Image (tube, coloured by chain):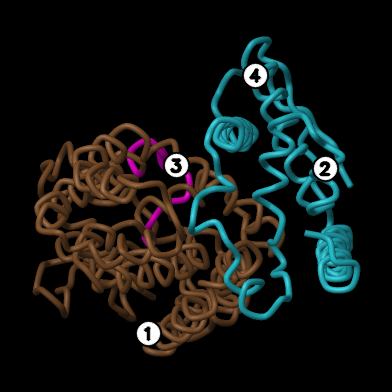
Chain colours: A brown, B cyan
Amino acid sequence: MQARCPRCASIFTTDRSGLQFCPNCGQQVDVPAFPGAPPEGSGAGWGGPSGPGAPGSSGPGPALREDTPWERRATLGLWTGFFETWKRAVFSPQLFWPTVRPDAPWMDAVLYAWILATVGGLLSIPLGALGMGSFGMQQALDSMGSLPPGTRDAIRNAVARGGVGQVIFAIVLYPLILIIWAAIQHLFCMLFGVAKNGYFATLRVLAYAASPGVFSFIPCVGHLASLYTLVLIILGLSSVQESSLGRASAAVLVPLLLVCCCAAVGVVLGAGAIAAMLSHGQ
Amino acid sequence: MTLRWSARSREFGFLHALGLAGLTGLLVARFVPLAGLPFMRCAIREHTGWPCPGCGLTRVAVRVAHGDVAGAFDANPLGTVAALGFAACTVLAVLQMLFALPLPLVSLDAREARATRLAIVSAVVVNYAVVVVRVRFLGWP
């Protein structure tokens, strides 16, 4: 059977219940008796035959699910809860997603993503002031063709002052955008059979998968962060919605192909390859 | 197929999220000059002459938001159906919130779900074929 350390959250395999030590951090863990647990490797754990165990799935099912550290912030503390959630979502998604409950309050997850977006927005202000986005701006101005005199400078000035606007945008509109994005994403999840646990499970996945977005203000790294966010969404949907990795990939990548296939081809190939690597590396 | 009705409640749910998406999209399409934005062009169509599967969706949103359903249908038929569906979700969500209406909960068995998916995928393929024929062979904008 598998057990989860309450201290470091790592999941380890054990063949007995009772008191024992976490092989990762040494914390003493009282593993409860689990009479219905099949023997190790029979398929009900990581990657079993159906639902969470579907081929390619990354979830052990509901047995090990609990509130995220962020949702336990009342006991763990605000900062610890936030940072632990962020750390697990970004650096150990294969351990994080199987523990995420699909039915926990969605407002907590949205609040988490909202804070991240706000932090990302705040961090982007200094870089914007340094003109780090000037290359993209020049490209956009070039693509506009001939403009009336003074219009280019007016656009440049408006965008240069846009740093504060971006923060306000992040603060005010981010939850709305997230809820809408989740609704559209969930439609595709329904189409591909990745909607077992409902809309709010999808919303929670998108919210926690936004964790790499805190790096979005760094030029170039921001693009990689977006790509990694897609990977996290695929892994998260497959685990939290208890479906296969292939179906989750299709649910995430097909809308990109349909709506903005011009930019999506590279994203699709990259995200699919990384998700496959992570999946095989578990 | 089984049909159940939800309890009367004003809890925010999937329908309301879809309604919110529809309302926001239509408001943006109504009041923001999307067609003039430089990044709204389709790079595939500009470079190859072939439309992408999503070609015409911006025009659909703009035309539906301005009440020009026939024009929207010319741009992308399935996109128009989707836009009208989102608009319907907006109206339903408002009515549901106002009167705490019970909502129909449809559940399909595996065979029906497969058939539904097949129908949707077929509709997308046929729609894309229509868009390609119009753009490539009939010279539609």
The residue to which callout 2 is attached is B71
Q: Are marks 3 and 2 in contact (CB under 8 Å)?
A: no
The disc labelled 3 sits on which kind of residue? Ile
- Mark 3–mark 1 Cα distance, whole angstroms, equals 32 Å
The secondary structure type at the circle numbered 2 is helix
Label 1: chain letter: A
Q: Position of residue A11 (x, y in %)?
A: 29, 72
The disc labelled 1 sits on which kind of residue? Gln
- Earlier residue among tags 3 and 1: 3
Image disc number at residue A177: 3
Label 4: chain letter: B
Determine if marks 3 and 4 fall on one subunit. Answer: no
With respect to residue A8, does A279 lie above or below?
Answer: below
Is any atom of residue B110 visible in this view?
no
- Earlier residue among tags 2 and 4: 2
Near mark 1 (Cα within 10 A), the count class, few <14, some 14-19 or many ≥20, is few
Image disc number at residue A243: none
The residue to which callout 4 is attached is B94
* Circle 3 or circle 1, nearest the eye: 3
The residue to which callout 1 is attached is A282
Label 2: chain letter: B
Q: Pick whichever, A39 or B68, lies toward us.
A: B68
Q: Are marks 4 and 1 in contact (CB under 8 Å)?
A: no
Q: Are marks 3 and 1 in contact (CB under 8 Å)?
A: no
The disc labelled 4 sits on which kind of residue? Val
Q: Position of residue A246 (x, y in %)?
A: 60, 77
